[in-house]
Image (cartoon, rainbow, N blue to C red):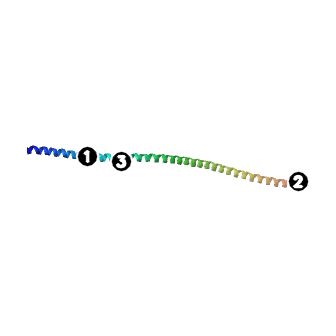
Amino acid sequence: MNHLACPRARAEEEREEQRQKQAAIRELLAELGEELRERQAETKEANAELREVQRDNGAVLRAVAAAKKGVSDAADETAEVSAALEEALAQRKAAEEALKQAQAAARQAEAEYKNKVAQALGRR
């Protein structure tokens, strides 16, 4: 009987060990499941924060792009105005040179006129 009791006791011990192992595994699985749920919640929160940052930065990026376009347009306009000013300065210089030539021609014509008048008066 002792012989039969021993294998039964041993089988009972093995079953108890198996139950303890299974209980330990269930406990570990429960802990891992809880940790997984925490990580999923953290991930969900991080994704929500990321979307918010993207929305906020999207508005900023659009504002920056608009500002860059404004600066680019102003730079283009400034270049056009500078070119127009340079052209106007060149035309002014040309006009001043033409005026100087006209004034010189007028002085020369006046001098020639006075000379002719003096000659005409001198002949009399």
Instruction: Estimate the x, y position of residue 90 in percent, counting from the top left.
Output: 67, 51
Which of the pair 17/79 is nearer the observer? 17
Give the alpha-carbon distance from disc 3 to disc 2, as whole Å: 119 Å
Which of the pair 40/63 is nearer the observer? 40
Give the alpha-carbon distance from disc 1 to disc 2, as whole Å: 136 Å
Amino acid type of the residue that numbered disc 2 sits on in the rendered structure: Ala
Instruction: Look at mark 1 in the image and give the residue it sits on.
Output: 25
SS for dot 3: helix
Q: Is residue 117 left or right of residue 25?
A: right
Which of the pair 72/12 is nearer the observer? 12
Task: Look at 39% across and 46% down and name the residue there.
Answer: 43
Instruction: Estimate the x, y position of residue 111 in percent, counting from the top left.
Output: 82, 55
Q: Is residue 89 left or right of residue 58?
A: right
Instruction: Estimate the x, y position of residue 107 in percent, counting from the top left.
Output: 79, 54
Kindly identify which numbered label has been placed on residue 120.
Answer: 2
Work out whether mark 1 precedes mark 3 in sequence or the reverse, and give the earlier one. Answer: 1
Instruction: Estimate the x, y position of residue 11 in percent, counting from the top left.
Output: 15, 44
Q: Is residue 88 left or right of residue 11?
A: right
Instruction: Look at mark 3 in the image and give the residue it sits on.
Output: 38
